[in-house]
Image (tube, rainbow, N blue to C red):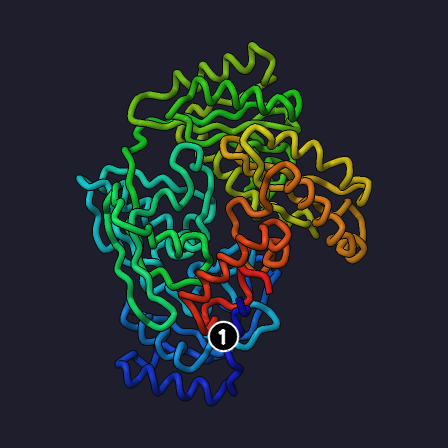
Amino acid sequence: MSPIADPPVAEPDAAVAVLRARLAAAGVAPSVLVTDADILEPHLRDWRGWHRGEGLALARPRSVPDVQAILSACHDLGLPVVPQGGNSSMCGASVPASGRPPAVVLSLSALDRIRHVDAPGWNLVAEAGCTLGAVQAAARAAGRHFGLDLGARDTARIGGLVSTNAGGMGVLRYGAMRDQVLGLEVVLADGTLWNGLRALRKDNSGFDLKQLFIGTEGTHGVVTAACLRLHPPETSAASLLLALPDLAAANRVAEIALRRGGRALSALELVPGLGLALAAQVLGGPLPMPENHAWNVLLHLAGEEPVEGLAEAIASAALEGGAAVDGVLAQSGAQEARLWALRDAFSEAHRLLGLSFRFDLAVPVGRITELAEALMPPVLRLAPGARFFVFGHLGDGNLHVSIAQPEGADAASFAALRPAIESLVHEMVWRMGGTISAEHGIGQLHREEIALQKPAEELALMRAVKGMLDPKGILNPGQLLPD
């Protein structure tokens, strides 16, 4: 099978002029297409500052027909298109890939309506530009709960969450984004609209086509709306932070929490003392406990029935059995919000560490602490004094590992160790039956490593699907699939 070719290179000014004419003929307002460099620049660089590509123009459609017209014209002209939501991608998937021809950045931010909420049907339809926070608020207003949650809830948008199959802190109870999606509305590469906004819980009438667009990072089509599953409201909640005697004790706390918490347990987080200290610097204010222990577990329980007793039972069992040495059970909404604000601040806290290499790893459930302990000695042999910022989701096997430069070390010297450290980490994860991308996606950051993780037959199937849906290769070129 021949590889998918990059879109042909066109002279930028001429390409934009033809594109403008095509859009005008389709009735798209002139203001939808922007070429001002100052406006375009923020859309070309990812929020971490790791990736920057070249932009031909910024398209800001106001409706689904606008999206159709833009993709139809770009398809005919052979112009690359990069779909973009909140531009909070962790792997550079939401900006043009570096070293590629200039692309049209397609911002879905103006498609931000909650089209309808069907409380009796336990679903709502949200456009791609809706933030996660807006969807959560719409669900609450209808006496329902939306299961996905993550720290970037006020910037991450539904289209991006679908296209990356986002995870977050509620996966243990509700599943990842894939599990929240009942149906999708998608514009294909040539401008064709597929309306798959079905609210069915059971539909065994053929291929589940929506799965072609979930987790494929905008390389198969542009999600314009999603029908999302809703859940019973969380009218009772409790949060508990337990300090551990050592890292291995996290497994014992997880066992206690999973057994006693049952369906009420919605989050089970491994939290390092380093992360709490850094987050407290970012946010200001005190640490949760007088002594900041090296390892902690943060739990959240919620449901329609009271859960405080479950939290107390988990705390008692962990403390009495020696799995925990101290703990804090939030006594108010403010205290609970503070605990989770500290956890949410972990991404921002990285900036205090200087240069760091960050990994989004997953291993089979129960092997998180094994992975963390196994990684540290060989990394320290390569980079003596390196600092480890390790946290993650104990309930689903997802471990976030950041390896930061030693205090006072030269960043350039540490940067030179990146290939060796990445190779070591990835090989260890693969040996444990894991993956190098648990919830952040592949983007342009990991597209070459994925060739080492997946067998050739699997990559060939992925390329075949991509070639069928986007034969000209205009959608997000340089992302997800390796050359």
The number of numbered discs placed on residues in the rendered structure image is: 1
Other residues around mark 1 within 10 Å, as few (<14) / some (14–19) / many (≥20): many
Residue at the far top in the pictured view: 320
Secondary element at image label 1: strand
Question: Vertical placement of 153 versus 247: above or below?
Answer: below
Which residue corresponds to the image point at 80% horizontal and 41% vertical from the top-left? 385
Which residue corresponds to the image point at 77% horizontal and 45% vertical from the top-left? 407
Residue at the far left in the pictured view: 120
Which residue corresponds to the image point at 73% horizontal and 36% vertical from the top-left? 376
| Coordinates of residue 171 in the picture (x, y in percent) | 44, 37
Identified by mark 1, the residue type is Ala
Question: Vertical placement of 448 versus 76: above or below?
Answer: above
Which residue corresponds to the image point at 62% horizontal and 33% vertical from the top-left? 272
Q: Nearer the viewer, residue 70 or 205?
A: 205
Q: Nearer the viewer, residue 165 or 160?
A: 165
Q: 135 left or right of 74? A: left
| Coordinates of residue 464 in the picture (x, y in percent) | 47, 62
Q: Is residue 31 visible?
A: yes
Q: 47 left or right of 124? A: right
Residue at the far front in the pictured view: 1
| Coordinates of residue 225 in the picture (x, y in percent) | 30, 57
Quadrant where the C terminus lies? bottom right
Residue on which the image places disc 1: 103
| Coordinates of residue 213 in the picture (x, y in percent) | 39, 56
Q: Is residue 39 visible?
A: no
Question: Vertical placement of 220 versus 300: above or below?
Answer: below
Q: 381 left or right of 428? A: right
Question: Vertical placement of 355 versus 54: above or below?
Answer: above
Q: Nearer the viewer, residue 38 or 470?
A: 470
Splitting the image into 4 quarters, where does residue 146 fall?
Answer: top left
